[in-house]
Image (cartoon, helix red, strand yellow):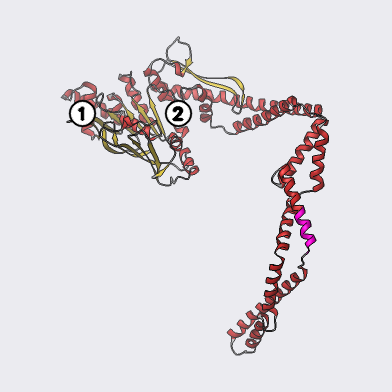
Amino acid sequence: MIRQITVKNFVLIDEVTLDLSLGMSVFTGETGAGKSLLIDAIGLLCGDRASNQFIRKNANSAFIEGVFEIDPLSKAGLLCNEYDIDATDLIIISREIFSDGKSTSKINHRLTPLSVIRELTGAIIDIHSQHDSQYLLNDKYHLSLLDEFSGENKLNIIVKDSYKQWNALVLEVNEKSSNEYNVDDLDFLNFQIQEIESFNPSQEDFDALEQKQRQLMAFEKISKLANTSMNLLDESDGVKEKLFESFKSLSGCHEDGTLIDLSSQLESLYYQIEDITEGLNHHLSTLEFSEDDLNIIQQRLFDYGKLKRKYGNAIDLIMKKKDEFKNRVYTIEHRQDVLDELIKKRDSAYEEYQKAAMSLSIFRKEQAILLQNEILSHLKDLQLESTRFVIEVSESKPSLLGSDKVVFVISTNPGEPLRPLSKVASGGELSRIMLGLKAIFTKLQGISTIIFDEIDTGVSGMIATKIGQKMHSLSKDAQILTVTHLAQVAACGDEHYLVSKVAKEETTLTFIENLNEQNRIEQLAMISSGTTSEKALIAARELYLRNKSTN
């Protein structure tokens, strides 16, 4: 959710900082006062296209900054973890637009690609206006919305895995059916197989050869260092002899327990040195340099290099290439048998896919009825009692998501045919339908802030009240910011902000003020009747208190 938003030099806004809270915040004001400017600023913060036209007159740049609180386990929290953004407390997203039209975007004061900010804020904020064409209206998202509602994951995974297996076999059958295999290739393929097998490459052999080559090429250095160390340890006046004398000297002092313990430790060291000396002596006896051995090793390593250049720059790639050659030989020699076997596997995989897709389809149809009923319940709350809402699940071509096509269709009046959501003509009806859908899907998708920009246009009376109440109900699961021109909606808010425009000499500025209870009532009276007369104030107070008690 948005904890704080700061806007500077943005169109008519000089500078404003709002501390936003949970619940429902409403923004009202006269037409042209700039009620939607804050929404536009948040849209730019979320990655909307920038323009220098957003910069206030006589300013060099416009600046928007938002402070966000994010649940680490939400989709947004997981994205923060993926992009190495610290979201343990709050994150700060900012964007500055310059006079040349360019802009910079930052998260926690670090420059961040706008694509990352779009992805992250898309998981936090849903900005909805009356006429936008978004995912809830688009048929291509309805299948995923149904799956989100159902919460089923196991069947989806089975379908996805079985589709991948079947599709891979389809591609392999097509490839082997269309490929022309030349029997004359057999001799060359067998030659390549023989070349690899006769060389008998292995990673262990290659590593051992390299190690032995390094040892032989450093023979003189190794011998010199080993002999030097041996002399220091084992010569007549060396370390081992002095250690022996030291522990023998101390071991004779029986009167001092500390010296006896130290003598014992020295004795242990002496025998360790003796073991090391014997090890060095043995290793020196095995060291020998052979020009012939070095030449043999270098020649085999050279041959390894030729093999790598020819078949792959690693031992495992060479072995993989050998297996490919063998498979091609087998395919050429037994082409029809191989193809028949692949076709059987393909057909069997398709049967498995169909079974899984059918099970998923049956489950989806069951869940579609539950979702229909829940959506209709919300639409009834919004005075759409005569509405029919149906989730059509029909057969579609196979895909990773199954063999279903899902479309949300609706009829808002008796006798009217069912039509796709995007074909609903009435703006007021569409706004209520979208609000009813958001009451379900917002929580499922983890959206923490929903912004409504005058979606109550075209409604009034009891319907307006129902919209306000539904928004407030939705604010129990997500922070709600709404621009409205209706007193019935404004009365439902937990916080009420007045947007006003003031002309000063050669400039005009927009101000945003958080109203107290008395000022809210006065503003409700102005919205309802255009006056703050005693009767208007009484009616406004009644509206305010009635909605406050309902909330």
> In the displayed structure, would residue 353 be above or below residue 246?
above
- Check residue 529 for magenta coloring: no
268 vs 76, left or right, is right
Tell me the chief SS of the magenta region: helix
Where residue 472 sits in the image (x, y, percent)? 35, 30
- Crowding around mark 2 (Cα neighbors within 10 Å: few <14, some 14 to 19, many 20+) is some
Number of marks in picture: 2
Q: Could you tell me if residue 370 is visible in this image?
A: no
User: Which of 274 and 230 lies nearest the eye of the viewer?
Assistant: 230
Mark 2: amino acid: Ile
Q: Which residues are magenta?
A: 290-299
Where residue 287 sits in the image (x, y, percent)? 76, 68
- Give the residue drawn at x 48%, y 11%: 417
Quadrant of residue 413 within the rendered picture: top left
Where residue 516 sits in the image (x, y, percent)? 23, 35
Where residue 67 sits in the image (x, y, percent)? 36, 41
Q: Which mark is residue 522?
A: 1
Task: Give the labeled residue for mark 2.
Answer: 440
Q: Quadrant of the N terminus?
A: top left
Residue lying farthest top?
Answer: 415
Quadrant of residue 248 within the rendered picture: bottom right
Precedes in sequence: disc 2 or disc 1: 2
Mark 1: amino acid: Glu
Quadrant of residue 162 within the rendered picture: top right
- Crowding around mark 1 (Cα neighbors within 10 Å: few <14, some 14 to 19, many 20+) is many
- What kind of element bears circle 2? helix
- What kind of element bears circle 1? helix
User: Which of 42 and 68 lies nearest the eye of the viewer?
Assistant: 42
> In the displayed structure, would residue 316 be above or below residue 332?
below
> In the displayed structure, would residue 18 be above or below residue 300?
above
- Give the residue drawn at x 76%, y 59%: 294
